[in-house]
């Protein structure tokens, strides 16, 4: 194994594991755990080595099958994509530990099918992070989407209907993206991102370029559920099987935001994105601020833990879109840092929800009474995740929010400052209400689960949760080196923080 | 008026794709029957496929299969063959669209088993109860 092919192995491991899981999982359930955990551990280590290599030797490009670009498909491994590679494989690894247990509980007899889709989804996400080709990106986007539709439809209750609505909305998003690529192809005659970027500035077709830009962005916004294009997300994510939600919720929206950054800076230039159309940049920051406020407000109305988390997720999408569009280095640093942090916080909270639902069978607020006494470790980790979501130091959520706020002040977008502060306050209200329910209210006689054996979730559910909570603190304390060594290099030239 | 008509006739392939796309879009958003929504999605995707296919066409161009020896000795006149790349891209897009339709149909079967209907209003009514 040469180290230049390493990122290919990172992506191939889950893909090959998907086939193996499907075949051997039919024979015996015992194969599924070791195969999927092994493949993802391999990916995580490979991604870590890739990141170290990029940091030492700089970014590099890789041509698949030795077809030279712009004709062949090119993979781009720069600091940001290497960081995302590590994030995706690491989060997937932790989520898999928990998914193994909850899927065994919720979908007995169908585990091999679940994990086949699950591993293909991970491979698709890793591919999305690496690709440097606009059409290849569309294909991988659809691979991740189709597997997600299947995973969500495996849930119970309204899951099938939610999945169908997601299919309709997701297809609209993907088709818009494809149309945008079509316009770019007419204009430039190439699909390679770097090649498009080198041809575009010399063209004199402002209307066609603007149309392509708008189609690409709106397509991705539908996929990432930026308010008001979010309608499909809460139902789909809250009714998915617990094991699928734990993995989809932290990663799908974050990877799509990474793709938006790619489109903005790798296909178009920062100059074009921010300054070619007057008012667009400010308008999008306004829209993101509104998105944060509305989604936080809707989160207040929810009476189910997982549904509340999905609305917080939509608000966080607003944070990152707004942060990138602030058009200064500080805001972009905050947004990129928030991609990492938000993936970890969402993972932490969803893992805690998975542990709670495994023990008590419900996530309705009035069933959470007395949880601190019954599941102390789970709730301790949940508290760390909640503190990070609110933005209390030294958890990592504080630092990215701090950068976002600084960037907003620098750009003098006071509406974004107000939205960030208001949303932090609302998050505090949301989570302290939960702490009160779970800490002070004693478990009543009417709660049947109170008679169940006390204690935390089984180790397979608990250990990834505790690890994630520790990771939140470690990333929070390591924010300085992370920005200095990785994120600073990922900013487009001229946008130093 | 005449100018507009000339404009439409000159670029009729784009107009057809826009009209088809809007029909599909309307069906996806406006119709309350889930199968009709799915059909709308198919029309929407087909519109984009036609758009891509039409941009590869050249007037008087032949199929892009060339004699190797002739091409090596004389080179290829790019105006004489149509551009095959958009067509090849659309093969992939057709595969994607077929698989999405397959998944959606499977989910529709599940919805029908669960609720006994495919009308969105009736399903929502049943959920509300």
Image (cartoon, rainbow, N blue to C red):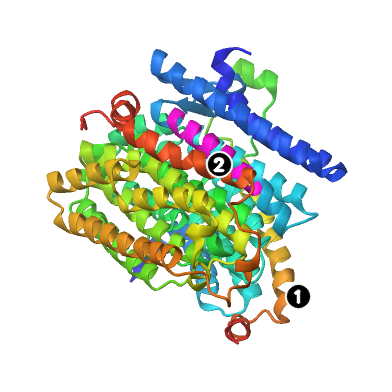
Give, as a single range, the part of the protein colored magenta: A82-99
The image's mark for residue A464 is 2
Quarter-of-image position of residue A95 = top right
Where the N terminus of chain A falls, by quadrant? top right
To the question of a shared chain for discs 2 and 1, the answer is no
Instruction: Determine the residue positioned at 59% across, 25% down.
Output: A8
Per the image, label 1 sits on a secondary structure element best described as: helix
Q: Tell me if label 2 and label 1 are in contact, CB under 8 Å.
A: no
The image's mark for residue A107 is none
* Residue A13 vertical placement versus B5 (above, below): above
Residue B82 x %, y %: 58, 39
Residue A420 x %, y %: 24, 55
Q: Is residue A230 visible?
A: no
Where the C terminus of chain A falls, by quadrant? top left
* Residue A260 vertical placement versus B100 (above, below): above
Q: Nearer the viewer, mark 2 or mark 1?
A: 2
Residue B67 x %, y %: 69, 25
The image's mark for residue B113 is 1
Instruction: Determine the residue positioned at 30% across, 40% down.
Output: A394
Q: Is residue A27 magenta?
A: no
Chain ID at mark 2? A
Instruction: Determine the residue positioned at 67% across, 67% down.
Output: A156
Q: Residues within 10 Å of mark 2 (few under 14, many from 20)?
A: many
Q: Is residue A309 visible?
A: yes
Prevailing secondary structure class for the magenta stretch in the rendered image: helix
Instruction: Determine the residue positioned at 43% across, 62% down.
Output: A439
Per the image, label 2 sits on a secondary structure element best described as: helix
């Amino acid at each position: 194994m040469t180290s230049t092919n390493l990122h290919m192995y990172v992506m191939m491991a889950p893909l090959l594991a998907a086939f193996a899981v499907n075949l051997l999982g039919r024979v015996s359930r015992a194969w599924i755990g070791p195969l999927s955990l092994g493949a993802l551990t391999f990916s995580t280590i490979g991604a870590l080595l890739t990141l170290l290599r990029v940091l030492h030797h700089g970014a590099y490009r890789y041509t698949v099958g030795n077809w030279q670009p712009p004709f062949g498909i090119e993979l781009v491994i720069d600091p940001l994509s290497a960081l995302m590679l590590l994030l995706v494989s690491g989060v997937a690894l932790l989520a898999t530990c928990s998914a193994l247990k909850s899927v065994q509980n919720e979908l007995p007899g169908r585990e091999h099918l679940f994990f086949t889709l699950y591993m293909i989804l991970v491979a698709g996400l890793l591919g999305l992070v690496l690709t440097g080709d606009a059409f290849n990106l569309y294909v991988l986007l659809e691979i991740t989407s189709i597997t997600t539709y299947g995973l969500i439809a495996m849930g119970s209750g309204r899951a099938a209907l939610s999945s169908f609505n997601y299919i309709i909305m997701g297809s609209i998003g993907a088709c818009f993206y494809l149309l945008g690529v079509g316009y770019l192809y007419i204009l430039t005659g190439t699909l390679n991102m770097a090649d498009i970027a080198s041809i575009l500035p010399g063209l004199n077709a402002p209307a066609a370029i603007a149309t392509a830009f708008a189609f690409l962005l709106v397509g991705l916004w539908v996929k990432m559920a930026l308010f008001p294009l979010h309608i499909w997300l809460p139902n789909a994510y809250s009714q998915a099987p617990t094991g699928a939600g734990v993995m989809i919720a932290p990663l799908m929206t974050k990877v799509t935001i990474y793709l938006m950054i790619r489109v903005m800076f790798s296909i178009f230039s920062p100059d074009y994105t921010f300054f070619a159309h007057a008012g667009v940049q400010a308008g999008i920051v306004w829209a993101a601020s509104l998105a944060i406020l509305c989604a936080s407000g809707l989160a207040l109305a929810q009476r189910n833990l997982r549904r509340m988390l999905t609305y917080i997720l939509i608000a966080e999408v607003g944070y990152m879109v707004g942060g990138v569009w602030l058009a200064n280095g500080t805001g972009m640093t905050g947004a990129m840092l928030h991609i990492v942090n938000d993936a970890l916080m969402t993972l932490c909270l969803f893992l805690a929800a998975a542990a709670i639902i495994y023990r008590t069978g419900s996530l309705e607020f009035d069933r959470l009474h007395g949880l601190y006494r019954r599941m102390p470790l789970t709730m301790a980790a949940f508290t760390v995740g909640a503190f990070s979501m609110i933005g209390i130091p030294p958890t990592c959520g504080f630092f990215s929010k701090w950068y976002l706020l600084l960037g907003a002040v620098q750009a003098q977008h006071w509406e974004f400052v107000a939205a960030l502060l208001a949303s932090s306050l609302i998050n505090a209200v949301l989570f302290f209400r939960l702490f009160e329910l779970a800490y002070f209210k004693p478990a009543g006689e009417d709660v049947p689960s109170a008679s169940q054996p006390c204690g935390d979730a089984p180790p397979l559910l608990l250990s990834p949760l505790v690890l994630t909570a520790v990771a939140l603190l470690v990333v929070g304390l390591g924010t300085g080196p992370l920005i200095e060594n990785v994120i600073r290099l990922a900013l487009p030239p001229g946008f130093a923080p | 008026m005449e100018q507009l008509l000339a404009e439409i006739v000159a670029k009729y392939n784009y107009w057809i794709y826009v009209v088809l796309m809007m029909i599909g879009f309307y069906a996806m958003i406006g119709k309350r029957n889930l199968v009709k929504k799915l059909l709308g999605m198919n029309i929407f995707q087909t519109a984009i496929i036609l758009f891509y296919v039409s941009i590869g066409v050249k007037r008087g161009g032949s199929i892009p299969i060339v004699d190797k020896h002739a091409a090596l000795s004389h080179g290829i006149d790019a105006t004489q063959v149509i551009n095959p790349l958009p067509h090849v891209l659309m093969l992939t897009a057709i595969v994607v669209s077929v698989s999405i339709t397959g998944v959606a149909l499977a989910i529709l079967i599940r919805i029908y088993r669960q609720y006994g209907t495919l009308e969105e209003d009736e399903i929502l009514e049943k959920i509300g109860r």
